[in-house]
Amino acid sequence: DQQVKQNSPSLSVQEGRISILNCDYTNSMFDYFLWYKKYPAEGPTFLISISSIKDKNEDGRFTVFLNKSAKHLSLHIVPSQPGDSAVYFCAASARVNSGYSTLTFGKGTMLLVSP
Amino acid sequence: KAGVTQTPRYLIKTRGQQVTLSCSPISGHRSVSWYQQTPGQGLQFLFEYFSETQRNKGNFPGRFSGRQFSNSRSEMNVSTLELGDSALYLCASSPRQGIGNTEAFFGQGTRLTVV
């Protein structure tokens, strides 16, 4: 049972345009969400996160939007650059007694930004 | 500050053999989590160690085990290897237990190929 779903395996965008990566989740206990970026032959690197008490978080060209009622979040990259070409993973966690649970990841979306 | 170090980077093993992978977390980080990444399944949680104790375990068979030493370094072991164990094994370190609300720092991974 996939609790975090990234339904688009890949996305192609032209340089300078907006990239929108989507993520849906099913577990209503999730209340913290993160995006990771992964280049080939490297480990994932943290990009941006959002707590469930917010609906938007911005960091430079990257903005994450959270719609709790729809159990949906999205990552916007504006403007997209060729160096953004990578696999993007959406991850979620839930608050537990000892703090937060481990991360549950989606399967990833491969973003290709062409010049 | 040195990042998360995983050794070896690449490994080729034969079916039925066993393998041990190593992870040295960022200095001062006490939590180490292991993930398996395969093309079809994304990142799947294996287990989390904090202060030498396994705190969480994912849905993997008993052939997968791990441990953490007093210096926070961690090892994971896979016995009786199967072809389906071929994957990228990623280690993530975090200062606190339950990495879900912190930006976990990932190593580059160990690419295991079972033939």
Image: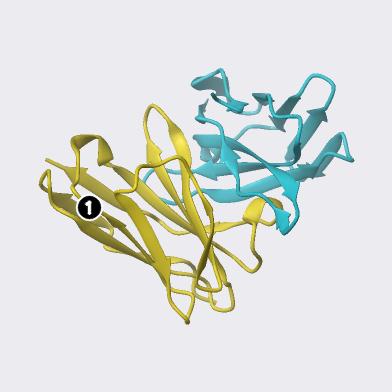
Whole-percent x, y for residue B7 in the image: 30, 65
Q: Quadrant of residue A29?
A: top right
Which residue sits at x=13%, y=52%? B17
Query: Which residue in the structure is indicated by mark 1?
Result: B79
- Residue at the image position 28 percent from the left and 58 percent from the top: B9
Q: Amino acid at mark 1?
A: Ser
For residue B19, side relative to residue B1 (left or right): left
Q: Residue furthest front?
A: B62
**Of A75 and B115, the residue lying toward us:** B115
Above/below status of B51 relative to A27: below
Picture colour for chain A = cyan
Q: Colour of chain B?
A: yellow
Q: Nearer the viewer, residue A65 or A72?
A: A72
Residue at x 19% of width, y 45% of height: B81
The residue at 14%/50% (across/down) is B13
- Residue B81 visible here: yes
Within 10 Å of the Cα at label 1, are there few (<14), some (14-19), or many (20+) other Cα atoms? some
Residue B78: percent from left, percent from top: 27, 53
Q: Chain of mark 1?
A: B
Classify the position of the C terminus of chain B by image quarter. Answer: top left
Q: Residue furthest bottom?
A: B71
- The answer to whether residue A111 is left or right of residue B60 is right
Q: Position of residue B59 (x, y in %)?
A: 45, 40
Q: Is residue A85 visible?
A: no
In the depicted structure, whether residue A52 falls above or below residue B102? above
Please provide percent x and percent y for residue B16: 12, 46
B85 left or right of A72?
left
